[in-house]
Amino acid sequence: MKAAWYEKYGSADVVEIRDIARPEPKDNEILVQVFATTVTTADWRFRASAFPKIMWLAGRAMAGLFAPKAKVLGSEFAGRVVAKGKDVTKFKGGDEVMGFSMPFGAHAEYIVISEDQPVVKKPANIGYDEAAATPFGANTALAFLRDFAKVQPGQKVLISGASGGVGVWAVQIAKHLGAEVTAVTSTGNVGLMKSLGADRVIDYKKENYWQTGETWDLVLDTAGTTTVAHAKRALNPKGIFLPVEFAGAEMLQALRSMIFGGKQVLLRISGDNKENLATVAGLLESGEIRPVIDSHYSLEQIADAHRRVESRHKRGSVVVTVSPKALEMAKAA
């Protein structure tokens, strides 16, 4: 099978297309023919070894100290089940699925995943490209807003980095949870934010949210676009700053807020799980939320997809079509 392969850390040029052996499912696994996948921020960071300074050694140890452990990146995927292990009961051949795989492996024509990992049946009302654009960002937004911040109806929530791969989902899920949502984005994305349900949009090129005089119950930073100091200026007395990406400064401020109280800096890591993905699939099926796709690339163009993500200017997800012919056959079936 064809796969996007890399053997050393570096620029997008280290990724190349290779023929490798197709994996075979174990007793509790399904084999999925991948029709679409994405390149995420995690793929870029692992490929380039671009971890925050204070977490660089830990990140490198996880990725591979001297060379990558996982030679095929890619965590999000959508496709069709083509084989299953003897103990699998939740899926059958032909099922259309979407999922999230760690450690990676989705930048290939086939992937194996345990039926108990984050993989669910694809809602019939969305395409494979939209399904592939969902698991990472939507699961992260759901976990951070509902599970970690415990957002309640009527609360005021500000989403910084609102047009990114997590941000577009955070705006929609915060609205689903009943919050009053302010989205911070650039001029070209104002219309998109309004279409996703944001009650207010702040164009950071024209105005700084922390200088408006307004305050919020939660400031969610989805892409490292704001600071603890700025967020605290904009929080209510018992408000929460919750960054998806964090480094040393945020760690120190989180410890300080734990000791002294007041405005909180809350640090959490999203543990993607099957239950949350099933919830997301239900919201997609009902039309309450929708994917946002920045651009499409073929598997052969995956280095360009990496460059697009590394630019940090994408809107939503960067989708990679893995098997165009198989995808067209699936659509026609």
Image: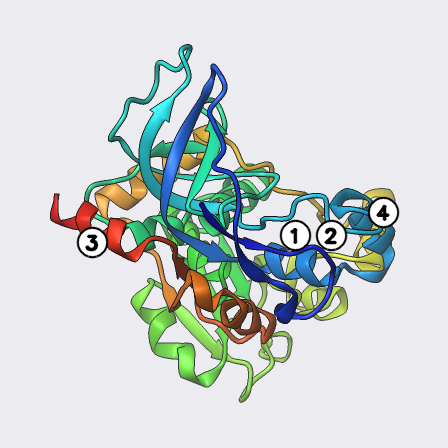
Q: Are marks 3 and 1 in contact (CB under 8 Å)?
A: no
**Marks 3/1: CA–CA distance:** 46 Å
Q: Is residue 86 above or below residue 132?
A: above
3 or 1: tag closer to the N-terminus: 1
Residue lying at the far top of the rendered structure:
87
Q: Nearer the viewer, mark 4 or mark 3?
A: 3
Q: Are marks 4 and 2 in contact (CB under 8 Å)?
A: no
Q: Which mark is residue 255?
A: 4
Under circle 2, the secondary element is strand
Which residue was labeled with disc 2? 265
Q: Quadrant of the N terminus?
A: top left
Q: Which mark is residue 143?
A: none
Q: Which quarter of the picture shows residue 333? A: top left
For label 3, count other residues whose C-alpha is less than 10 Å away and answer few (under 14), some (14-19) or many (20+).
Answer: few
Indicate the amino acid at tag 3.
Glu
**Marks 2/3: CA–CA distance:** 47 Å
Which residue was labeled with disc 3? 328
